[in-house]
């Protein structure tokens, strides 16, 4: 990293790039513009630092390398994994020796496993097939991954003081509750508001009245027998109510449909008249009336 920094800060003689462009300062030192890089510029070794992936420990680093390259955790390629692991340990050993100690212990274990895999296995009498040297490491990695995933799930749970806070309120039980004073005018306004709401809720009772269309047909025929023409509006009596007027109108329509009554008008907008649709003569009119009544 120091060589790279030197290349950036000290251009090579073949570099023809000017240090200033149109008099623009490279930096300011104590308020004064700096157009050229000082030749005696010194950069301490600790000024540049390489930030690597943050791991919780050796197992976390191993699990990261395995999952990143999609290695089978039950069939780990120890040579490639050990090489990548040692390159990381060499990087952190030059900066933090205490942190590297724990990683060096795991590196020794990886080298031991790799060595055991290279040596031939001589089965002992009374024992079955020798255990894979990677089995213990795989078991520890699987357990560590399960614990890590459980920790991540717990981390997502809302935490008091981080995601939410408990509400606090002061309550003095010795405080006397003071109710507001109510005067006579306020009571009057409240009572009037109750009356207004009560007036909006009214019950409407509908009474049933037995009315016969045939009976009103007979009454219309009897009235028309004594009069030649009767104006349409005179056939209805508003004082008897809407229900009677509706039934009387239906009776008139029924008589008109049967041809017993005719409704005539001399010209548009002229008065409408109602008359019998037949000639009333003695018994003939009685028979016709009786016929209409029976229907």
Image: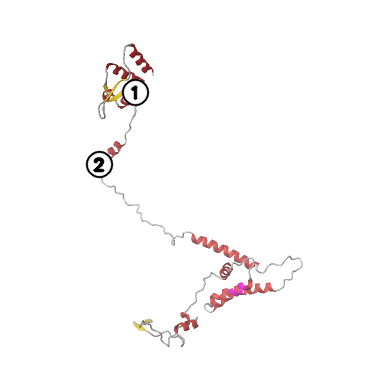
Q: Is residue 40 above or below residue 75?
A: below
**Residue linked to disc 2:** 189
- In the picture provided, is 224 more to the left or to the right than 148? left
Residue 256 circle label? 1
| Quarter-of-image position of residue 75 | bottom right
Q: Which residue is rendered at x = 65% and y = 73% of the image? A: 114
Work out whether residue 146 or residue 275 is closer to the camera in this orientation and state it: 275
Which one is earlier in the sequence, the residue at label 2 or at label 1? Answer: 2
Viewer-proximal residue, 268 or 36?
A: 268
Is 99 a magenta residue?
no
Is there a contact, CB below 8 Å, between mark 2 and mark 1?
Answer: no
Q: Using the image, determine if residue 22 lies above or below residue 210.
A: below
Q: Is there any visible trace of residue 109 in the rendered image?
A: no
Q: Secondary structure at mark 1?
A: helix
Residue drawn at point x = 54 percent, y = 62 percent: 149
* Chief secondary structure of the magenta portion: helix
Residue 41, position in %: x, y? 43, 86
CA distance separating discs 2 and 1:
60 Å
- Residue extent of the magenta highlight: 80-84
- The residue nearer to you, when weighing 182 against 292, is 292
Residue at 52% over, 62% down: 152
């Amino acid at each position: 990293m120091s060589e790279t920094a030197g290349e950036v800060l000290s251009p090579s003689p073949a570099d023809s790039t000017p240090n200033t462009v149109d008099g623009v300062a490279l930096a300011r030192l104590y308020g004064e513009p700096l157009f050229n890089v000082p030749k005696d510029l010194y950069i301490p070794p600790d000024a540049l630092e390489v930030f690597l992936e943050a791991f919780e420990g050796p197992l976390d680093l191993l699990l990261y390398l395995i999952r990143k390259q999609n290695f089978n955790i039950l069939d780990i390629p120890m040579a490639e994994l050990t090489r990548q692991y040692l390159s990381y340990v060499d990087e952190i050993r030059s900066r933090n020796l205490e942190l590297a100690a724990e990683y060096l212990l795991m590196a020794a274990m990886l080298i031991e496993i790799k060595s055991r895999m290279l040596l031939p296995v001589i089965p002992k009498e009374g024992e079955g097939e020798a255990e894979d040297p990677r089995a213990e490491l795989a078991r520890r990695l699987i357990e560590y991954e399960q614990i890590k995933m459980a920790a991540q799930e717990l981390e997502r749970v809302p935490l008091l003081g981080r995601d939410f806070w408990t509400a606090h309120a002061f309550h003095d039980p010795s405080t006397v509750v003071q109710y507001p004073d109510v005067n006579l005018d306020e009571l009057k306004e409240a009572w009037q508001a109750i009356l207004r709401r009560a007036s909006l809720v009214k019950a409407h009772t509908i009474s049933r009245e037995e009315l016969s269309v045939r009976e009103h047909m007979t009454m219309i025929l009897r009235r028309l027998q004594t009069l030649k023409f009767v104006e349409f509006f005179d056939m209805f009596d508003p004082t008897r109510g809407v229900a009677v007027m509706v039934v009387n109108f239906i009776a008139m329509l029924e008589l008109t449909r049967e041809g017993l009554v005719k409704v005539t008008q001399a010209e548009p907008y002229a008065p409408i008249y109602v008359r019998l649709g037949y000639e009333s003569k003695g018994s003939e009119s009685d028979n016709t009336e009786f016929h209409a009544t029976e229907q």
